[in-house]
Image (cartoon, coloured by chain):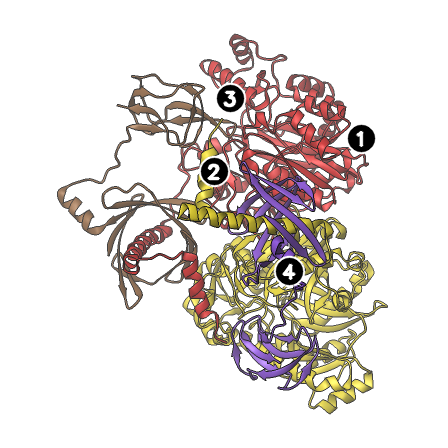
Chain colours: A yellow, B red, C purple, D brown
Amino acid sequence: MFKKILIANRGEIAVRVIRACKEMEIKTVTVFSEIDRKSLHVRLSDEAYFIGPPPSNQSYLVMEKLINVAEKSNAEAIHPGYGFLAENPQFAKLVEEKGLVFIGPPAKAIELLGDKMRARKTISESGVPIVPGMENMIASENDAISFAKEVGFPVLIKAAAGGGGKGMRIVESEKQMKEAIRGASFEAKSSFGDERIYIEKYLEKPRHIEFQILADKFGNIIHLGERECSIQRRHQKVIEESPSTVVDEDMRKRMGDAAIMAAKASGYVSAGTMEFLVDKDKNFYFLESNTRLQVEHPVTELVTGIDIVKEQLKIASGEKLSFKQEDVRWSGASIECRIYAEDPYNNFLPSAGIVSSYLEPSGPGIRVDSGLYEGCEVSLYYDPIISKLLTWGSTRNEAICRMKRALQEYHISGIATTIPFHLQVMDNKKFIKGDISTHFIQEEFGKKEITVDHDELYKVIALLCALTDFKEKKKIKTLKEKKFRESPWKIEGRRMGLRRFGF
Amino acid sequence: MFKKILIANRGEIAVRVIRACKEMEIKTVTVFSEIDRKSLHVRLSDEAYFIGPPPSNQSYLVMEKLINVAEKSNAEAIHPGYGFLAENPQFAKLVEEKGLVFIGPPAKAIELLGDKMRARKTISESGVPIVPGMENMIASENDAISFAKEVGFPVLIKAAAGGGGKGMRIVESEKQMKEAIRGASFEAKSSFGDERIYIEKYLEKPRHIEFQILADKFGNIIHLGERECSIQRRHQKVIEESPSTVVDEDMRKRMGDAAIMAAKASGYVSAGTMEFLVDKDKNFYFLESNTRLQVEHPVTELVTGIDIVKEQLKIASGEKLSFKQEDVRWSGASIECRIYAEDPYNNFLPSAGIVSSYLEPSGPGIRVDSGLYEGCEVSLYYDPIISKLLTWGSTRNEAICRMKRALQEYHISGIATTIPFHLQVMDNKKFIKGDISTHFIQEEFGKKEITVDHDELYKVIALLCALTDFKEKKKIKTLKEKKFRESPWKIEGRRMGLRRFGF
Amino acid sequence: MKYIAKIKDKKFKISIEEKDDKLEVILDNIPVSVDFTLVKPPNFLSFLLDNRSYDAEVNVDSGRQDATQKYFVTIKGKKYECILEDEKFAKLKDFAGIKSKTKVEKEFKTPMPGLVVAVEVNEGDKVKAGDGLVIVEAMKMENELKASFDAKIKQINVKPGQPVEKDEVLIVFE
Amino acid sequence: MKYIAKIKDKKFKISIEEKDDKLEVILDNIPVSVDFTLVKPPNFLSFLLDNRSYDAEVNVDSGRQDATQKYFVTIKGKKYECILEDEKFAKLKDFAGIKSKTKVEKEFKTPMPGLVVAVEVNEGDKVKAGDGLVIVEAMKMENELKASFDAKIKQINVKPGQPVEKDEVLIVFE
């Protein structure tokens, strides 16, 4: 096993990898941009190196800087996390050329699967069904329109190098095509440095279901079951769960086999994900592969008890998988809510600032993966996922009830977050029934306000405001009388001190 | 199911019960003493009632006050938590007389099992082996000495109404007897309001292993496996785990059967624990029964996936157990470290004050049950258990490594805690091997200092102190120059603000 | 003191008096028992209303208009807006027939810093509530800023490629 | 500034100078690179020593003696004590042959408030390090307070049943 690795990432996923390493007694090296000096990943790692200004193209995306740090710190391997360079085959290649180990699939597999067109071809040839689409990149608007007319609107434009919903557009009519192509290729370029986009048939109300796979360097490949990722906003997953309410044992076997076939066909090694669309009749189509650790990997960890990051590390260091497909056991149900720094009361616009007060939910069946702490800064430079709140329950219903409880306990001040939105979803009847598709949010929350009425709370709110005003005015009066001001903590401390004793 | 219950407790266990209730949509009513107005259990419950001054005999132990609150708030049932009135048969009886449901065993069973002498007799007659002891309470010092001479020193003095190590003394020689009797009966009286004590043979290096049982009102009794509770200080459990390294499948079956037999013999209903001592040859002896939810119940929850508090609520409301013995599945390993507000650097003396800074560990396999938050007060009036840190791992080794990681992440300022002590245990070779007994702490930590040397850290500490002094002196100089002082937060905020922008 | 509090379409009359160090609170003519304590400075409170327990964060909106004050209250993970008025002032207003009405903002500001990717309108255009005005990139995403009421564009202050600060005026309406 | 820091039996020489807004730090004659930043007021720091990362809480002991200062540093869950001396002072002391020696406390204080349950010694008794002196009840437990060095009891200030405050003097040694 490695003695020391570099984590070429930041935020919650860097913290996640550090935790796995600590539990395996592997030393961790992290990197930080100017704005990340106090980030939790810097604080928790064994070593940390400064790599430049906040914009990621001057720090976290600069391959040479990362290689330099790895060499200077004698790290043996590099874990890329997700995002940034995680799916960049040049980086994987460079790492290997420098005699270091890339903790992920071989550069070749990243290249093949990262090129959506080649991936579709390879996977399709291995016998796995795929979504109908153009065989080449979009060359012109007319090109795209004629394909769309052939298979029928709506169609989906996607970044060839994409992932995470970036550089993706649904096109419902001819006149939307131009702007969609422009927007998608802009986002594709700014997110992945590759502006190429392609087009495919847009399935009506599909479910988005993915399979977690693990493949070692000796050709052993297993799957850890599915994750239901249909709850999406702007093509970004916001809530994931395992198992899916639509996948039964037989379907799990067939989809799992297809995922393993796809991994075999692409020469896959390490942890990875095969994504499928599932239509109303439970037909499934290969969509794309994510050649990295997924944001939502913890839902699988909660139902299987397998630590996927540790397995990645073992595989990368050349160990054989220590268990077989039949050893994988699923138990209960797990849900993840991605907490974004976005304001659900203001059109989900990004929110940034200092987290002025912070209390994580806790107790039975709760897991929080985050890089937050009281006093930390959430900046606008990076991904808006600031925390992942997960629950496990012996049934899906218990997991949902627990999530409601946890969301109400989770207290983040100073920035806006999507917690209120998640609470709405947990109360939604269709969600509770498991009657969902990728259109769920659009259909259920499209026009509605986020806050539903809570008559019983209005009185409380009215009183709180009046009492705050009353107290404030009284304080000003008292201050004028006293002519000096004490910090609330001091006043508090003294008051406590006064009644501390009295057995 | 109940619509509303009263939780007649405080602190972490009240919070634990609230969480279960929230997940079952049961409204919760809590009570608070003067010093507990801001406690987390008050903040998280639906209703909260003031019941008097901090000393528990004027608040949490006053039965009439609790009954009054239950009646005023229309609560249908009372959950007693652990400690306080949890094992007081008069309280259980009173609750039932008032037409309310006591969430626990029937008063009769509490009475029988709470009287250690009667319990020993009943259990012994049902065919379960017991530790040799006197058949009556200690009447005089001579009485006790003659029994001790008969079975041989050391002997153990225990409170008849006891539990949690209170009112317990090991007596190694004749001359210690007097003081031990005095101390034990004092503690017994102040903890349980019952000064009666008895005496039994003290087994050499026993393990303390207990079985969790669940019994419904229809005579169905199952067990949820064992908890190893041998790591004790001053007869108080400090670290528990499940499964025990010494219990194999056959032994689990035999001990589980004995636990169920003991529960049957005593007419037990609800969640409860049968405690055993296990000697070097794996013989086990019934020790006592705890007729309540145990502090350490979460280790069982983590390996079985069963929420014991929810089961208690279901049983109390008259539901049948929804699963059978053969449905109980154990998976992986779990450890609990009880975090006490005690100073390991000062002879484990109690510590109290305001928690000035607080960060809970988080991420995979971690559970924290606590009533703490930043700014809360830990008072000297109540039990020193302020938090329970638990880890789950697919193996015991993973759970231990995770615990080390979690303990290092857990940050509690303002009061002393036993976190450093737990870190020492997790590094102990005998503990890692599972080679433990109730003498473990005495033998391994008796004379040693808590802090072992960390040469590599000394330089860091030296530099931190020098830099702090340097910065402080510079600040004083700067202040003199500037003639005014800003809060560190303001300075920070402004600095951040300055570099916030720069795409 | 007497207050009128408005939340959405509901209105509450509140009276608070301090007598012998205790608060006497009347809500819509019914006396209520309140216990109101700071859990965490500056604004995180624990509130017991007739023994019902609520944890809340109370934020005052910084811009004060007349004798009314806007509050944001977060309870159980959700945020609510409340307008608090001094009753004397409210009476006066009713008497004079003044309607409390949100002032129409003439300036369209960006709620966050970022990079302007596209401007979707031209000076002189008429826009409707919900129409996109400017696309600003932040957190690696394009965010479309939309009009919240019908208006006519008077002036556009930014162009694509331009970085903007939080609260910078992007567009001025007529 | 020059310092001598002592932790247990180890001694470190440290020099800190500020040049052009940067800190130049030398530890035992070897220059080191330090990056020292406040993560959480008042005393929670993130520290990079030659890129090795440490999270630490640094507390100054309130009682200052001469030019030395006692610190408590908590790192990775454990607490360490460090004595920091100004080097000039230390040299002077060495020259004068003054040994830095812990002053023997004449007063025996209780580290926490509680109720005195028993006094285990009498005035005039000689006690050894480790001998029990007073039993104080707190958090529902009896806590035996022990002598930390050999001493003779001069005066006893408390008796069983008496409540005591934190840092109250229970016993005076000769």
Q: What's the distance in space between the residues labelled 1 and 3, CA to CA? A: 38 Å
Q: Is residue B388 above or below residue A275?
A: above
Instruction: Inspect the image, locate mark 1, and give the three-letter code of the amino acid beneath it.
Output: Lys
Binning the other alpha carbons within 10 Å of mark 3 as few (below 14), some (14 to 19) or many (20 upward) gives many
- Residue underneath mark 1: B217
Tell me if B324 is positioned left or right of A366 in this view: right
- Residue underneath mark 2: A496
CB under 8 Å between callouts 4 and 2?
no
Chain identity of mark 1: B
Q: Earlier in the sequence, mark 1 or mark 3?
A: 3
Q: What's the distance in space between the residues labelled 3 and 4, CA to CA? A: 79 Å
Q: Nearer the viewer, mark 4 or mark 1?
A: 4
Residue B462 seen by the camera: yes
Q: What's the distance in space between the residues labelled 4 and 1, CA to CA? A: 66 Å
CB under 8 Å between callouts 3 and 2?
no
User: Do circles 4 and 1 both sit on a common chain?
Assistant: no
